[in-house]
Image (cartoon, rainbow, N blue to C red):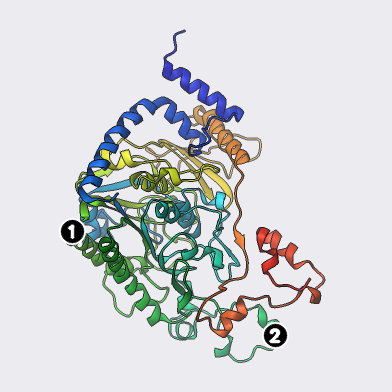
Amino acid sequence: MNFTKQTVAIFITLALVLTGYEIVNAQEIVQDPEYYILKAQHGDDWAQQDNEINKKLKALKKKYGTTPNIIHIMWDDSPMGEVGFPFIQQLRGFSTPEINTMAAEGINFTRMYTEPSCTQSRAAALTGRHSVRTGLTQVGFPFEYGGLRDSEVTMAEVLTQAGYATAFFGKAHLGDIEESYMTNQGFDEANWNPYNQFPVIYGPQAEIGGGVLPTSTNPEIYPEDPYDIDKGWRTLGHVAALEGVKGGPVREVVVPGDIQGWYKNMEGQKDRTLAFIDKSVEAKKPFFIAYWPELIAFVPFPERKTLSGGFLQEGLVRFDPFIGKLKEHLKEKGIAENTLVILMADNGPMTHNGPPGMVETIYRGGKGDYLEGGIRVPAIAWWPGMIAPNQTVGDIIHETDLFTTFANIADAEKFIPTDRVIDGVDQTSLLLNGDTYSRRDYVHVYTGEVYAATVKGRFKRHWVGDLPGLSGASFYDLYNDPREVQPKMLPGFTTKGMFNAMRARHDLWNEKYPHSLEARGFPFTNIENARPETIKASKPRFEQKDVPFDVMEVMKRTKDLKEFEAEWGIDK
């Protein structure tokens, strides 16, 4: 039997990965095992593509004097097809002409995958790692008592080392402890929401006038409850928005329930984005802006701009003009050709207990689901002169790929850590060469800490729901069953062994490179203008000596504490 060199390379790679042998050079990025298998097959072609890409990037840098600028815009809870496809919008009763034009002028992705919920997705995008690796597996709410650990390396930290000016504006949703502040995660300047837009409804104004059911945050607007005997248990003193600069003070800028202040701050983030561009251009520095806008509050707009009237659609229509303004601003500054803009949603629609308008558009499922509707989102790439217009791309791309792709474009790959798994792969070739040039054909799907599904090309396997000891109908053909409603047992059996091997390799790597854990601590410490109730929330509400259980052990069972034990200030 004759084997080509490529076939031999594949066999060797498979054997090494399955046995756990160290195949990664100590100075190279550690990728998921599936990547090495693809590289063994296509590495020579990829090397040739990279040579051409490097020539283009060098020519661009010579022309503009800096590596490319990067703007990443990511909003909430939108299904694939919600923007970028005017004919779908016509059926849905709204339109986003500026976003649709951007899609027509660049790449409109049809298989951009994300994590299935807000905090998970944002952690993955910022670190290039599945959120299970960072411990941020649950959607954060007041009080989270945790957040992104400072040992995680963010996109901003990598690009800072490459000389970039970095800014964050919008919804971070990555924790309420000081360690997770955006100004402590690599951003030079930040105005951010530590949670989501829910704090807007956690105030008397919204609860009285916005049709919001009773929350735990406004006991003063109700008669005294004689059965409410643990009054300190309530979530009081949380923060809706913070701002600051790296190494400087952090200030609270929006208090919970301040709907007008929230919208004013939200609109101000658009102006701050344009101002940061101006400041960076004047300083002749490349810039990275993560502008992750909150389009809506969970309080209805007083007037309607869409026939739909849905919360998401109303938010998108109001945000849409900014995209046109941003494009014109980049052109006026003479840097449009040297600026990559990525526009996308963070996960699928909130179909479970969500507001009006949050519905499935093409795929089944929504936020929190491992179905395609929960993890396949609208995404657009715009880069005049570098990305050809009028492209609809069917390749798989994952949000973690942006981390590695941005680093490559910025000539910053050498700053990516090599002591942990980086799930993102470099997709510069997909951006510049277009359809069929992706470097992944797989996705590992987690919902929370559960490994729920695996995608491989057109095929998908659900890992949850089967009866123990029985190979059930867990196999789907996404070409013929895009809504995952017709699982096939007998036709899918031919993929069973291959999916099992994929999972075994993935699990093996998880053992070799253990997951990190969410950092833990008290929220909202060291805020320059903290209110009395915020200061109270940042400290323990009882001492260890007053209770018989081990307070530290309770928190350890909730999440890991590690270095935070000394910071609790509990008298033991």
Can you give x and y, in whole percent of width and height, for residue 426 in the image?
39, 41
Q: Which amino acid does label 1 sit on?
A: Lys
Q: Residue furthest bottom?
A: 223
- Residue drawn where x is 41% and y is 67% of the image: 190
For residue 294, which numbered disc appears in the image? none
> Which residue is under mark 1?
331
Q: Choose between 456 and 433: the one closer to the eye.
A: 433
Q: Which amino acid does label 2 sit on?
A: Tyr
- Residue drawn where x is 57% and y is 44% of the image: 464
| CB within 8 Å, label 2 to label 1 | no
**Viewport quadrant of the C terminus:** bottom right
> Which residue is under mark 2?
227
Q: Choose between 91 and 561: the one closer to the eye.
A: 561
Q: Is residue 365 visible?
A: no
* Crowd class of label 2 (few under 14; some 14 to 19; many from 20; radius 10 Å): few
Q: In this view, does 469 lie to the left or right of 427?
A: right
- Residue drawn where x is 80% and y is 77% of the image: 546
- The span from disc 2 to disc 1 (Cα, nearest Å) is 62 Å
Q: Is residue 88 left or right of residue 249?
A: left
Can you give x and y, in whole percent of width and height, for residue 272 in the image?
32, 70
Secondary structure of the residue carrying tag 1 is helix
Mark 2 vs 1, N-terminal side: 2
Q: Choose between 515 and 416: the one closer to the eye.
A: 416
**Which quadrant of the structure image shows residue 72?**
bottom left
Can you give x and y, in whole percent of width and height, for residue 145 in the image?
60, 67
Secondary structure of the residue carrying tag 2 is loop
Looking at the image, residue 367 lies above or below residue 128: below
Q: Is residue 189 left or right of residue 490?
A: left
